[in-house]
Amino acid sequence: MADGNSLDAFVKGKLDALEKRALRRVLVETARGPAAAAARDGKRLVSFCCNDYLNLSQSDRVKEAAKAAIDAYGAGSGASRHITGNHPLYTELETRLARLKETEDCVVFGSGYLANLGIISALVGVGDVIFADELSHSCLMMGARLSYAKTHIFRHNDMAHLTALLEEHRKDGRHAMILTDGVFSMDGDLAPVQDMAALARRHDAWLMTDDAHGIGVVADGKGSSFVGGAKADVPLQMGTLSKAVGGYGGYLCASRAVCDFIRTRARTLIYTTGLPPAAVAAAIAAIDIIESDKALTRRPVEKAKRFTRALNLPDPESPIVPVLLDDAQVTLEASKMLEAEGFLVTGIRPPTVPEGTARLRITFTAEHEDADIDRLAAIIRERIMPRKAAE
Ligand SMILES: *Cc1c(COP(=O)(O)O)cnc(C)c1O
């Protein structure tokens, strides 16, 4: 067909099919701030779905740091970090992140997604093997695919299954990686990082944790490798600057040798423009706050606990609390009802979560008001949970 209509026909067919299954996604204009406030269609809402756990995106100190960096260095970075984009703020941020994570060195990327694509595909390839938790974030899975290493998926947090796969398949690869979220993004639970570190050592596999939801809010802000007090032996601690850190960017904290290698081999660092100076300066200011205010880093989980206790749910391990409703349409309707009540709680549907596990993913921030948490819990207890129980 010469007129190109097969393209539009194709995507319209796909969109219609998604719509029928309540799986189509559309972007909704939403203004944010201050604190956990949001506004849609002129209506003020309290957001319980944002990853800005410490509300640092709205912090005056962080915003001032970003503005000062624009005045000093400009709005953009001009090129890849290897060309002229490696502006003077990078070294400071990388030094600060390495200190927080107790590693020799750190490399900052354009985003967490880019970090995972670049790190995994630089470290392993054809002839290597990967073992990944089934609930690992999309960008760990896509990094694994991009690497061409043979990938084995283990059941969520199931160390017996991981052990069995390592015993059977570790020998198939020259090198091996184990990939997991440190804090699972849609469930809020923690990976058993200490056990995984021991398994990784025993099988000579390189453990990489994605701590996107750990930094700033777990273990006094140091993240999932530090839960329980002792530092777990995780040679590859990756994470994002886009959630509790409040800005934008990704990072890998690791040994000096690994970071040197990543700087010279990770395509998503080399062939993409460096972060704008403002993003790097904002992250430095935010890390300052995280390092100096431990009470602040504990508050999101305390707020989450207030919510779970009100609903008789198990105590949370992170600021993320899922309320499983299973069905995508039911989840969308629950989200709409909450919005009418003044709460922004976006429904999470497949393929972000496995088929049949659609949910409300409720996240808590340091500045949520207790009264709002209590009212949200009451509405969920009275109007959402009974419906689920009756199914
Ligand atoms: C959000 C997220 C990422 C991606 O980080 P960005 O900086 O937003 O690209 C990676 N991993 C996990 C587990 C996440 O939740």
Image (tube, rainbow, N blue to C red):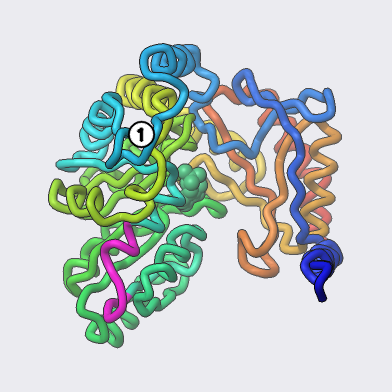
Q: The C terminus appears in which quarter of the rendering? A: bottom right
Residue drawn 25% across and 52% down? Answer: 262
- Confirm whether the magenta stretch covers residue 254: no
- The answer to which image quadrant residue 126 occupies is bottom left
Q: Please, what is the three-letter code of the amino acid marked with disc 1?
A: Gly
Beta carbon of the mark 1 residue lies under 8 A of ligand 1:
no
Name the spot of residue 168 as percent of width and height, x first. 29, 87
Query: Do we see residue 130 in this rendering?
Result: yes
Q: Secondary structure at mark 1?
A: loop
Q: Is residue 240 above or below residue 265?
A: above
Q: Is residue 51 left or right of residue 133?
A: right
Residue drawn 79% across and 49% down? Answer: 384
Q: Mark 1 = which residue?
A: 221
Name the spot of residue 243 as percent of width and height, x first. 49, 37
Asked whether 48 or 90 is in front, the reply is: 90
Q: In this picture, which residue range is highlighted in magenta?
A: 119-129
Residue drawn 76% across and 49% down? Answer: 26
The crowding category of the residue bearing disc 1, from other C-alpha atoms within 10 Å (few below 14, some 14 to 19, many at least 20), is many
Name the spot of residue 346 as percent of width and height, x first. 71, 44
Query: Do we see residue 216 in this rendering?
Result: no
